[in-house]
Structure formats: C-alpha cells, structure tokens
Amino acid sequence: MMARKNVVDEFGFLRLDARKKTPLFRQLYQQLRTAILQGRIKTDYRIPSSRDLMEQLGVSRTTIVTAIDLLIAEGYLQTFHGRGTFVGSEIPDEQILPEGVAPDEIQRCSDESNHLNEYGKSLQGLNRETWYTGTPKAFCPGEPALDEFPVDIWSKIVRRVWKSLAPIDLSYGEPAGYSPLRSQVAEYLAVHRGVNCDPEQVMIVNGTQQAVDVVARLTLEQGDQVLFENPGYINARDTFQKQGAEIIPVPVDHQGAVFEKVIQKHPKARLAYVTPSHQFPMGVILPVERRLELINWAKENESLILEDDYDSEYRYSQKPLPCMQGLDRASRIIYVGSFSKVVFPALGLGYAIVPPQMVSAFENALRLSSRPASQVDQIVLSEFIREGHFIRHLRRMRKTHALRRQVFVEQIQKHLADELEIIGGAAGLHCTTTFKSQNKNDVAIVKQLAEQGIITRPLSGYYMSGTKKDRRLNGLVSGFACSTPSQTRRRIRELAVILKR
C-alpha cells in the first residue's frame, strides 16, 4: 500500500499526452528529470515500480522502462538488485534548478534582444512549410528504393573496416575528405558523368546543401545577382537570399531553364544556379544548346555557374547527357552532387568539384565552418566503391527505379488521366504532374493527402513569390522510387478517390 501511496501523492504531477509530437517515454523522462533537478524528488528517494507507474499513467511497460533506463544511463537514477531504483546521490547537472521553479519559468531574452544579427533574424523568421514527415511514405520525392539496398554487404564492410581501423582513422580527418574516396569520386565522375577534374578538386561534404552554402559564402556579396530557375530548389534559393543576393528568376519551359533573355538583361550576374540533368521540380532535361549558351555567358562575363547534377544517375529512356562541367574550358563551373540518391540519404555524404583557383579557399571554408564528414563513413563508402558494389548497386537501382516509374505512370494514366498530366522526362526519382484544371489548390490537396499517409509536394510552392498566376502551375511533385509496384497501385487508387471528390 505504501508504494501505491507514493505513486499517487509524490508522483501525481506526471502527465503524459499521446497527442503531442514528443514520444511518451521522452515526456516521462523530461518530467522526472525536471522533478529531480527542482528537488521535488529528493536524493536517495525510491522510484515506484514500473507496474505502479503503468497503472497510474496508462502506458506500456516499454515506455516506463525506456524512460527509467535513460535516467539511469545519465546518472539521475541508480538501481540496486533486490532493492529497487533510487534518485542518484550525485546529480550530474552542475546547476540545480531552485525548488518550485520550472524550466519554462526561467527568464529568457526578449525577442528584441535575442543577440542575433540580421542574418540570424532572417533565418529565425524563415518558416517554410514542409510536406515531408521524415518517415518514408508514398510518394516522398527524392527517396530511392531503400528496400533494395544491399544492407548485408554494407554491414560486412562496416565490420571489417572497424576491425582494421588505425588510431588516426578515428581522428577528424582532412577537411576536404578522405583521400582515397576523393580519387574514386574523380574517377567515377570522369567515366560516368564526363567531369574533368583532378582528385585535389574533389571536396567531400555533408551533402549538397553544405556545398551550396559554402559556394554562397565564398562567391557572393550583398546585392550580387543570382540567376535561378523558377520554379526551383527552395533550399538553394533561400541560401543565396540569406547571403544577401538578389534572385533573378529564370523561367522553365518543356526543355528546362530559358536563359537567353535573362542573360541579355542581366549580363553581370555573379552566379547562375542550374539543375540541367533533371530539373527540379519540373523534371525536364536541359538541351546541349542551352548549356553551351550559359557556359559562354559565364566565360564572357567572368561569372560562375553552380551545376547541381541532381538525379543525374537515373535516366531510363536513353543514356544520360554528360554534365556541363565537362564542357567548360574556362573553369567557371562548380559541380555538386550527392550520394543520398545512389547509396542512402542517412549516409549524409556529397561532393563538390571546384575550379583549381578555388580549391584552397573552399578547403579552408570547410575547415572553419564544420568538422569534416565522418571519416569512418568515408572509409566504408570508399571500400564499397573499390570492391565494385557501388556500380553494381547503381545498375540494379536503374532497373528497379525504371520499373517503379513505369508502374507509377501507368497507374496515373489509368486512374487519373482526366485529372493529371505528366510532364518532364523519364529520369530521376520524382515525377511531376500538373492539374488539368488549374483552378485546383495544390497546397490544400497535398495537406489532404498527407492525412491519408500520401506524401507529395505542391508544385506551386517551388515558384518565387511574385510570379504571376498565369505563369505558375499547380500540380504534384511525387516520388515513385520508394514504393513497390503493389504499393503504388494501391496508393494511386486512393489518390484518385481523393482528387475526384
């Protein structure tokens, strides 16, 4: 009876809410930790059993045990066999909260004195709505067929690498990346993408976005003009804007970005950002004539091109076009790519191929801005490439993704031909569709779909603010690669029901 009295009297403050985004075990952990720091639960006090807490809180034993184990691991609680679990005698935090004072009652800086500069304040106010939950669902754009990744092979390499690591391999590594991996990237890109570079020009980064951020900070001054595809990749656009650049919209038609009139009007723009291999989000492929036009503009005006070779590895109807960087003879192109689509996103590795004259600056920027990408992950990826697994996996993925795209397109044509029109080429990991009736609100529809577990993105959201309504298309940007054919067939039928309401 005594233990049950403790639960009711001493632990009645515990309140768990399943409607919150915070997991229940984390809520319990936070509330118990705060109570210990406030002195509400005294040192050496015995914590009730998991059964008593289960009955009071109405949650599973796993929830209770997970929270308690976390507190034990951090030193807040101690457990003694046969006696129970007690509040630790030495609380790990240096500063204990005063009794009766909750963390949210501690005085904080006002919004007016939050110590942020103008750049920081602009980021604080950047509330972009997201339509991706972090959990792979149909039809998440940009998600490869992760169910087909050779986890067993990767795991074997991981185990072997860890067994053979030298102490130096556990250090930070070089800012530009693991030397063997840089050489392998240079060789792969030369053979498969037509890139012209030495290994010294290869910078291993924590994904494409880091490369874009470093390029912006190294090349742009306040007020510099950046030519940018419209619609285009939101994160890159935000990065340039927050660096103080003026974004010049470049319209996109059925062949990609139309630079001709824009470069005539803005010949001295500092930078042009382009996704020529599979334009995001429209999915079209930039023809050679427009590529050469842009390269000549950069040469004549001493400007730069940031070539984001997005989805370049996946083209299903014919061989991929070589990248623009291989056509450049004036060292005006910075080329970026990622392993997220060809290996797996959680790896978090990408690369930037920088002109020779920028190598030192780029490397030092990486040194100052962040720690290098995980040395161990780079070694594992290097071995994965060296042993031929990377190329074999890429070939399998091309076949797998081609089939999944074919099924996606067939099902759209079968169930939604009167609602949606497919645009773009047979490439990449997403398929863009426009509404045949442009009166539909794609943002509202995407929210409705998300409630049913179907994750797409509204095409209109990728246009710059101020784009005229008659130049802004409404539609859906949908990934087809992360769903099996059977899942796609089922989900397209559900999609059709929603769109035809």
Image (cartoon, helix red, strand yellow):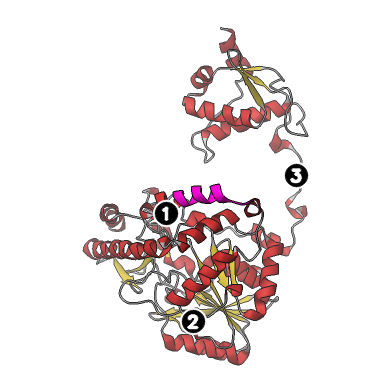
Along the viewing direction, whichever of 354 and 234 lies nearer the viewer: 354
Q: Which mark is residue 108?
A: 3
Q: Is residue 313 above or below residue 68?
A: below
Q: Secondary structure at mark 2?
A: loop
Query: Along the polypeptide, which appears first: circle 1 or circle 2?
Result: 2
Q: Which mark is residue 447?
A: 1
Q: Is residue 112 above or below residue 295?
A: above
Which residue is drawn at the image coordinates 50% and 82% (left, top)?
A: 326
Residue type at mark 2? Met
Quadrant the C terminus occupies: bottom left
- Measure the alpha-carbon separation of dots 1 and 2: 37 Å
Which residue is drawn at the image coordinates 62% and 54% (left, top)?
A: 169
Q: Secondary structure at mark 3?
A: loop
Along the viewing direction, whichever of 470 and 265 lies nearer the viewer: 265
| Residue 159 part of the magenta-drawn span | yes
Please give the range of residues in magenta: 156-166
Q: In the figure, residue 302 lies in which quadrant?
A: bottom right
Query: Along the polypeptide, which appears first: circle 1 or circle 3?
Result: 3
Q: Which mark is residue 491?
A: none
